[in-house]
Image: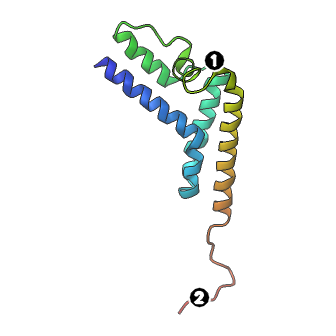
Amino acid sequence: MAGVLADITVGLHILALLYIGLGGFLAWRWPRSIFVHVFFAIWGVAVNVFPIPCPLTALEDYFRGLQGLSPLPGGFNAYYIYDTVFPRSMLPVVAAVALALVVFSYAGAYLRWKHREHPSPHAMPQA
């Protein structure tokens, strides 16, 4: 059972990473979702810049421990992503692209929010 729970945790972690990179685009359709995304984006940056443990990595390590396995060597990103999804040497490029996607999604969300339909104060009331 611990193996299944560890696998589910990996899946949730991947979804969280995708949401950190792409979740701002959801605010184009649901503007209030930007607040949730800002929290996730700040958290994602914080756990990669500061020595803050990621709760999903800690949870997976817990389930791995129940199976008699050691914690993820180097953490989630180092174990599953670096040199698997993209070469470690490309990390600065990937980080720049991710940041650009977040900024673009926020700019689009802002523009869509700014240009949403407002009733004109000079519009004639309908009878």
Front: mark 1 or 2:
1
Residue at left offset 59%, top offset 39%: 21
Q: Position of residue 22 (x, y in %)?
A: 57, 43
Q: Position of residue 16 (x, y in %)?
A: 51, 34
Instruction: Work out whether residue 76 or residue 127 is closer to the camera in this orientation and state it.
Output: 76
Residue at left offset 44%, top offset 15%: 61
Instruction: Work out whether residue 46 or residue 101 is closer to the camera in this orientation and state it.
Output: 101
Q: Amino acid at mark 1?
A: Pro
Q: Residues within 10 Å of mark 2 (few under 14, many from 20)?
A: few
Q: Position of residue 70 (x, y in %)?
A: 44, 7
18, above or below 67, in the image: below
- The residue under label 1 is 51
Left or right: residue 74 versus residue 88 is: left
Cα distance, mark 1 to mark 2? 58 Å
Q: Position of residue 101 (x, y in %)?
A: 66, 43
Q: Amino acid at mark 2?
A: Pro
71, above or below 47, in the image: above
